[in-house]
């Protein structure tokens, strides 16, 4: 049987190994919206990304900062999926610090260019956003030989 340590290691590998997360938000009447964004984690409890403050997900977060997030590799073969689901409080950082920008633009993948705090304040087109994660779950495939039940499920993990 897979240990909780194996599930934690899998969750960290998924977050560390992927460029994009999908963030789900809700509008003022509760209408759902999802969008993929390039992200950079600061550990496993804080995720940074940049977006236009005019994007629908950004406007939704200004109204309702609660968000759901998933990170997964969409290129794996069918039956090989691994995913980390998260519940988070997400917000625009109105006055980003140099330290926040350093975390947000820490080089993980080729092609990421750092921005300075002044690049993320009005009248610039983009802003820095942060999600503070309160809960993590991992995908347990229905066919998992140790934990599967025939139907895909989620299991809570503590990423510290």
Image (cartoon, rainbow, N blue to C red):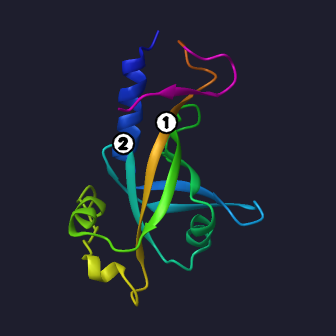
Q: Is residue 38 left or right of residue 109?
A: right
Residue situated furthest top in the rendering: 1
Nearest the camera: 141 or 123?
123
* Image point (33%, 44%), residue name: 16
Q: Earlier in the sequence, mark 2 or mark 1?
A: 2
- Would you place residue 38 above or below residue 3 in this image? below
Q: Quadrant of the C terminus?
A: top left
Q: What x and y, as percent, mark residue 132?
A: 43, 50
The reply to whether residue 89 is visible in this rendering is yes
Nearest the camera: 19 or 39?
39
Q: What x and y, as percent, mark residue 87?
A: 54, 44
* Image point (43%, 24%), residue name: 7
- Would you place residue 67 above or below residue 10 in this image? below
Are the residues tagged 2 and 1 within 8 Å (C-beta)? yes
Query: For the magenta stretch, what is the residue range?
Result: 147-160
- Would you place residue 126 above or below residue 6 in this image? below
Q: Main SS of the magenta segment? A: loop
Classify residue 23 by image quadrant. bottom right
Neighbourhood count class around disc 1 (C-alpha, 10 Å): few under 14, some 14–19, many 20 upward = many
Residue situated furthest bottom in the rendering: 123
- Would you place residue 121 above or below residue 87 in this image? below
Nearest the camera: 121 or 113?
121
Q: Which residue is identified by label 2?
A: 44
* Image point (70%, 65%), residue name: 27
Distance, label 2 to label 1, CA atoms, is 9 Å
Q: Which residue is identified by label 1?
A: 136
């Amino acid at each position: 049987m897979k240990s909780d340590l194996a599930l934690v290691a899998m969750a960290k590998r998924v977050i560390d190994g992927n460029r994009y997360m999908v963030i789900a938000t809700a509008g003022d009447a509760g209408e759902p919206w999802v969008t993929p964004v390039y992200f950079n984690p600061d550990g496993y409890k804080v995720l940074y990304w940049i977006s236009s403050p005019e994007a629908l997900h950004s406007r939704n977060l200004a109204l309702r900062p609660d968000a759901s997030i998933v990170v997964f590799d969409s290129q794996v073969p069918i039956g090989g999926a691994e995913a980390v689901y998260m519940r988070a409080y997400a917000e625009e950082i109105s006055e980003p610090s140099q330290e926040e920008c350093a975390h947000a633009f820490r080089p993980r993948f080729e092609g990421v260019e750092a921005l300075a705090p002044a690049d993320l304040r009005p009248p610039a087109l983009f802003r820095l956003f942060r999600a503070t994660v309160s809960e993590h779950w991992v995908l347990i495939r229905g066919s998992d030989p140790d934990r599967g039940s025939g139907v895909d499920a989620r299991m809570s993990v503590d990423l510290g």
